[in-house]
Amino acid sequence: MDATAAPNIFKKRSTPGSRWEKRVFGAFRAATYLVLFCGASVFLTIFFKGAGTVFKAEAPFINTTFFTDAPESLYVFEYEGVKHEMGDRQYRTFTDAIPAAAKVHADSYVYSAGGIWPAIAGTVLLVLGSMTIALVLGVSAAIYLSEYAKEGPFIRFVRLAILNLAGVPSIVFGLFGFGMFVNFFGWNVSLVAGWFTLAFMVLPVVITASEESLRSVPKGFREGSLALGATYWQTIRKNVLPYALPGILTSSILGIARVAGETAPIMFTAAYVIRDKLPWEDLKHASDFIFQGVMALPYHIYVVSSKIPQNEYTERVQYGTAFVFLLIVALIAAASIILRNHLRNRYKW
């Protein structure tokens, strides 16, 4: 190569600005990796500690009792040189069969035996009910704002109010639901009070995402439908809404993640610390189903983690419940993602 050749003018040169840019880029990358590491640490801790509660070493390899029973107190005692750990029902059966065992001192640990089936059922009901209400109200509001409302000071104020509503702390929604639905409407602590409280909390996300999805549908779809004689509502229902559904379902995925994990709103409106009966059991009237409280996984985690003495037995329940809770949220979100992808492939333009 000729040493006297002219240098390549397009070769990237190191300058103070480019060096500073590399440092900033490196800091952003390090921050990203740190966030991923912290998130992975949390999930892996829950997974490994919770798996010990959910899974067993022998067949059927799943702790079915944890999924099918209600929470119970755990009794730990030693009888005839053997250490026993029994739930409340099993302990009473054991002491009834062997009266001498009832005289042995037993340490009791509340909520450390049994399972979390009532909490699983309550969480699923709360998520499905609140998201149904949120999607109906949110999509209806988004259709009005996107398709019918004329731009003006009032509509701009409404959009600003929706954005501000998204920043309201969840405890405020809980107090609002307690005052409005529990006391004013007289619904007491019930499923329906929790549904509407959680639905109002997630409405800003649903409205904003749904409106953006509706606006992303090309105007030609509307104009072509109207030119063929369809009414405006027929145009929205047949030519706009189907193509906006993938984006609307994206908002539902975000809403599910927030609704399922909230504790403060349901603490005031829907959740009980302990409830053995499931919502559909012992109903005198059909309406009783929605006017009763339920157990819920986030509230159960809160109670077991902070309201009772901590020990090795409560830790098993804490991490096992958190493991199941994350699994349920992931399954519901995955169902929404699958449905969204199906609709996205079906309604491509």
Image: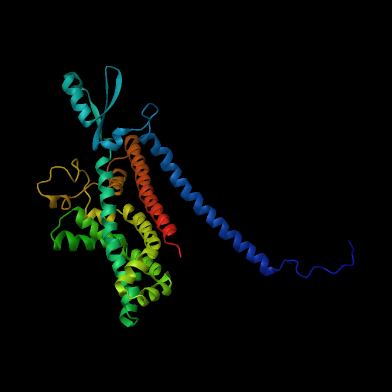
Residue 141 visible (yes or no): yes
Tell me the residue at 34%/67% (across/down): 238
281 sits left or right of 152 in the view: left
Q: Visible in this render: residue 159?
A: no
Q: Where is residue 26 in the image (x, y as percent from the top left)?
A: 60, 59
Q: Nearer the viewer, residue 135 or 20?
A: 135
Seen at 38% across and 69% down, the residue is 214
Q: Is residue 190 left or right of residue 114?
A: left
| Residue closest to the far front | 228
* Residue located farthest toward the top when viewing the structure as drawn: 80
| Spot occupied by residue 345 in the image (x, y as percentages of width and height) | 44, 57
Front one among 181 and 175: 181
Vertical placement of residue 278 versus 86, above or below: below
> Which residue is at a point 40% across and 74% down the rendered structure image?
224
Give me the residue at 20% from left, 60% from top: 178
Mark count: 0
Q: In this figure, which colouring scheme has been used for the structure?
A: rainbow
Q: Compared to 343, does 207 lie above or below?
A: below
Depicted 345 relative to depicted 207: above or below: above
Q: On the rendered structure, is 151 left or right of 292?
A: right
Q: Quadrant of the rendered structure where residue 83 is?
A: top left
Split into 4 quadrants, where in the image is the N terminus?
bottom right
Provide residue 86's location: percent of width, then percent of height. Answer: 26, 28
